Amino acid sequence: MATLEIRDLHVSVDTENGPKEILRGVDLTIAGGQTHAIMGPNGSGKSTLAYSIAGHPKYNVTSGTVTLDGEDVLDMSVDERARAGLFLAMQYPVEVPGVSVSNFLRTAKTAIDGEAPKLRTWVKDVNKALSDLDMDADFGNRNVNEGFSGGEKKRHEIVQLELLDPKIAILDETDSGLDIDALKIVSTGVNRFAEKGDKGVLLITHYTRILRYIKPDFVHVFVDGKVAEEGGAELADELEANGYERFLKATAK
Amino acid sequence: MSTDTLVATGNKAHSHGPGSPVPLQARSERPTSYDVDVFPVPHGREEEWRFTPIKALKSLFEDSEGTETPKIDASGPERVEIETVVADALKVLIPQDRASAIAWKQSPAALAIRIPNEAELTEPVHVNVASLGGRGYTHLIIEAGRHSRGLVIIDHTGAGELSSNVEIKVGDGAELRVVSIQQGDHDSLHLAQHDSLIGRDAKLKHVVVTLGGKVVRINANIRYAGPGGDAEFLGVYFAESGQHHEHRLFVDHEATNCKSNVHYKGALAGDNARSVWIGDVLIRAAAEGTDTYELNRNLLLTEGARADSVPNLEIETGEIEGAGHASATGRFDDEQLFYLQARGIPEDAARRLVVSGFFNDIIGKIGVPEVVEHLHEVIETKLARTAALTESALRKSNEPVLGQ
């Protein structure tokens, strides 16, 4: 069973005034077959957690461990982490001018699998993934994220999730900026992935809206760089009703 | 992450209202002559030399005989006439600087390549110019007869100091493609002037590929002999440490309903890698119906590289289809690298993907498979060298951290 284990993770970023600690001891275990939601106010460090796990060079891990099935993730390069089975759907997917979506997808799939996908099934798979996310087959000819609308970028992330088929998917505010139709399409894609079995999902979100379509097994409230409270789906309902206020008060000095 | 480097000279040509400052010298007023003495030895502050490392070019400003005759091999389909002619056989080109005037004078003969009227070539003409290590001059004439179709690929290699003139005449209704590749050794010098005269309803695609040489400077000038001419001028360059790649274009629109499209892209990597791109377009009062666009993009792959880019548009009539330009220079975007790596693509492959993406549109326009293939190979090699460079830089910057 796939397991991502985060233990006492401390992460800082370099600022003009020296390093600033953003994550202050995060503990989290995501096992295959589970969907976890991380919720929290802006600036609580949710995205930092996502990017730190993926290995963005901006974030310095100062202590703690991250392992995937016992393997030290922090010791891996960004691409090694992806090949080990981690996937990060980004909040702001990056444009790569001159590189077509189909070239990009094929290159990524080849890198992940260690061999080129079989042409005939691959074209079919890509077209299915695109149409499942309500994207035109013509998207393959467009350059990666270039000129995509916000919603198209997010759907393109989920297309990649389905095709690259990781062990653990981290979705960083994939719901932000989506209208309700796009939100449903994206959620259906994530559920389809989760239902393949032995897939872990870590859903990072500011709002409870997406949790109407993706049912979390666990909800973690993130405040000030660590998990402040944990519970089941009912915790999300409480946040929906009362917001983050009581957590913010608790941390105010 | 791109900075627009459109500079003041790019804007002043737009202001033609009464009372607006007149440019010091309109582009068309620069002297041209076959007489070397018209052009004093440049001191480096002249508008046309201010970006160029003239100290390195000293020997090519000396009005003396070459110390070698560069080796030229030309071959092509049978119907193409390839012969040696006197220098003033065509005179489409008039030297616009000292180096070109010296090359003209010191190269009493020219190699002429003539594609007969209505000939449609299916194979390219190849011209290989090898400089053996001394100072040499070359003079090439390319003439495409009316309604002909052809492709000429000029490949410059070698170690020496080369100054060359290339004259291109495209007959009425003809379609000519000329590719000029500069891939001299690391210490080689190459100055060139390419003048093109495009006939009525004729089309010229001119491709410059600059991949090697310590200093390469190419002045490409475009004129039209009649209405309906179409010029597509493409350029790709990749300057590495200590290399200076300079491309200057001047499109002189005087005939009606002509098109020009200039599109140059360059990558730079390493300390003191330099590129200069100057794109001058003049639309004269008579040139109604002109449609022109020029674009230059530069990608800085490492610290210490510098690209100058100056588009300049002078417009003397409002009766045009369109006139525009764009120029931007950006750093290699690490976020693109992260995005691709986060999808499992190893760093070196990701870097290659980003750079080939950058060049993708222009390489697609070149449309000559053998040139495109070669270009891909050289870009690969250069990127491998760049990767080694960045890695050692990273190691250096990491050392004090590790020591803590």
Image (tube, coloured by chain):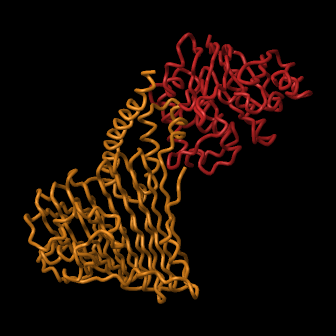
Chain colours: A red, B orange
Q: At which x and y percent is residue B10?
A: 49, 71
Above or below B62: residue A168: above
* Residue sticking out furthest to the right: A241
Residue visible at 75% across and 38% down in the picture: A176
Image quarter for residue B367? bottom left
Q: At which x and y percent is residue B144?
A: 28, 76
Residue visible at 60% across and 30% down in the picture: A13
Q: Please give left or right for residue A75 compared with residue A161 in the image.
A: left
Residue B347 visible? The answer is yes
Pick the quarter of the image with the N terminus of chain A.
top right
Q: Please give left or right for residue A187 compared with residue A236 in the image.
A: left
Pick the quarter of the image with the C terminus of chain A.
top right
Question: How many dots with numbers?
Answer: 0
Image quarter for residue B45? bottom left
Residue B220 visible? The answer is no
Q: At which x and y percent is residue A19?
A: 59, 29
Q: Please give left or right for residue B133 compared with residue B283 in the image.
A: left
Q: Nearer the viewer, residue A28 or B11?
A: B11
Above or below A149: residue A35: above
Residue visible at 40% across and 55% down in the picture: B266
Q: At which x and y percent is residue B258?
A: 45, 80
